Image (tube, rainbow, N blue to C red):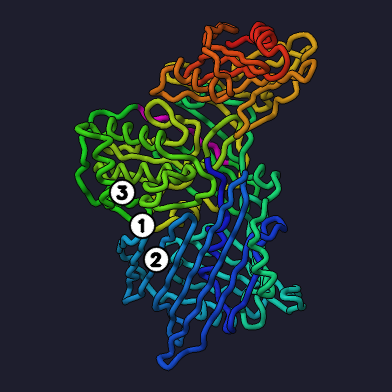
Amino acid sequence: MKPWRPALLLAAVLAAGPASETGGDWSVITIAGVPVGYVVETMTAPGPGGTILSSSEMKIVLNRMGNRVEIDLRSSAEETAEGRLAKVGYELRASLLSTKTEGVVKDGMVEIRSEAGGNTYSRTVAFQGELLGPEGIRRLTEKGLKKPGDIVEYQTFAAEAGAVTRGSRRALARETVRAGGRDLAVWKVEELIEAAGVKSTAWLDERAETVRAEMTTPFGLAEIVRADRMTALAAVGGAELPAELYERSILRTNIRLPKARALDYLRVELVHRNPEEGWPDIGTSGQKILSRTRETLRLEVRRPAVPGAASRPAAETAENREFLAPNEYVQSDLPEIRRLAQEIVGDEADAYRSALKLLRWVHENMIFDLGIAFAPAGELFKTRRGTCVGYATMLAALGRAAGLPTRVVMGYVYALGMFGGHAWTEVRIGRDWIPLDATIVSSGPADAARVAIASSSLADGAGGLTAGAAARLFGQVDLRVEAYGFAGGKTVEVPFKARPYEIEGGVYRNRWLGLEVAPPEGFSLTKTEAVWPDPAVAALEGPSGVRVEIREFSLLPWKAFRAAAAELLRSLDIGRVPAEAEAGGLKGLLASEDSRAAAVLAAEPTAWVVAVTGPNASAVLNLVLSGLSFR
């Protein structure tokens, strides 16, 4: 699971905005008041041929759960003396390698050339009218904003989104702001770049150059304020955002979903924290919008059935060509990736069974690494490290190399009491898009415990996932589970004021999970509100510092329970040969060693782990197991 990165959203604002006409203007980037990076912008006066050159460099450094995340973004633009865009350049490094994009504007066409790891990919984007560059936008703003309510509109090419996009600026009020150590008279302006998907607020000086800008991110308000060079450079020391900022980027659920990886049906209500932003259209394959108001949006998600027989490679059509073709992130044309895909699928001709083989390989061979924000498949092949986006990208690349149309989906997925930002893959089999999640694995198609927000072939780069609908919803909504269901079973309706659990007479009861915990004498409940990444559903404390945790884990569909249980016990540093265990109607394995003891109980596709630390751990484990009930 991956936490949402605000840097790409900031880039969408900066890359389409005007740059300075000086030797370099420096600004500090803060999130919720914490310095996290800098921006420096430069512009040259028109040369002999009348060409205006501008450039922008942004660097953000964050520390997250012990991982250092660095994102570097460089953009450049060439425009005519009249401010019309002629060429753009864009380089993003969010992993070990960078991806580079260059767009050359011709009559009604932008010719785009992208490069990653020495491999190049080309495409074109058509447009009508004219495209303005940073200086052209600045001049239009300076001329057009004279009083509150004035609006200027323009069209440009946003390389970070890989798209021609419209933008607008609306004058709100005259204000005075302090920037760069002095007070400046400015226009407060509302700016919207359609490809970015979110509004921002900017403060422009008399030349319509940005001295301050702010926008909402999943982690709080992000600000860009003009500063001196030393202050700006000092802002990339590697800030650790307060834990509560990450908390706001996840969606705690009103109940804990049982056996989430087996869910076939989910109905939820999303509540917008900023309803003036509006709802994007997120109706997609397997996901239906039931109702929409200004504040709420109700969705139902259905897990697709196992697809029927379909062979690979898929025949190329106009409809799926983009999803079979390689690009700078989904590098399915690399010889090493083509060889690997063939090794994995072998002689398997069925498309769906081939996709499952590729999914298993990605899950078993990739290492989850929060320090890798966004990487091309060639790098993922070499390092085998990435977040869920890396897993999804790698599976998409292997799928295309095996002749399967694929795309990457960004959205929310349920895990351990919350919905968090996540990415997975969809494979087109026949006429249906089948979700497959190589990070959080289900048996067969991905479970229904997820909400898709955006999907992309990644032909237009990272912006295809991170801008637009994703920018408008991540960190901006709350979620309530209305109903859920399993294959062949009835739908469980969740009352509006349902309680996640109850504690009566010291006994913990969770009707949704079917779990009841009766603490032994002298023990008390101490933890009942934990969410991902903490797997504890409930915890107990007893005499002499004894601690007990009841934890929930998902089992891999291809691993036998006994092997998975033994592996979980070893992960708890309990090396004894496991013995048979039984509690509350569930069977499993247990082991004890010195001051540690644990039992793993099967409720497939879930495993319950009861872990004890402290004196007499084995005896305490038996007492706790006798007080557990699973329904």
Magenta portion: prevailing SS class: strand
Between discs 3 and 1, the one toward the N terminus: 3
* Nearest-to-viewer mark from 3 and 2: 2
Q: Which mark is residue 328?
A: 1
- Is 600 located above or below residue 375 in the figure? above
Residue position for label 2: 101
Residue 485 picture location, percent across and down: 49, 22
Between discs 3 and 2, the one toward the N terminus: 2
* Nearest-to-viewer mark from 3 and 1: 1
At label 1, the amino acid type is Glu
Identify the residue shown where x is 56% and y is 58%.
Answer: 7
Between 466 and 546, which is closer to the camera in this rendering? Answer: 546
Between 58 and 152, which is closer to the camera in this rendering? Answer: 58
Magenta segment: 297-305
Residue position for label 3: 323
At label 2, the amino acid type is Thr
Quadrant (top left, top right, bottom left, bottom right) of the C terminus: top right
Q: CB under 8 Å between callouts 2 and 1?
A: yes
Disc 3 to disc 2, C-alpha distance: 20 Å
Residue 354 picture location, percent across and down: 27, 33
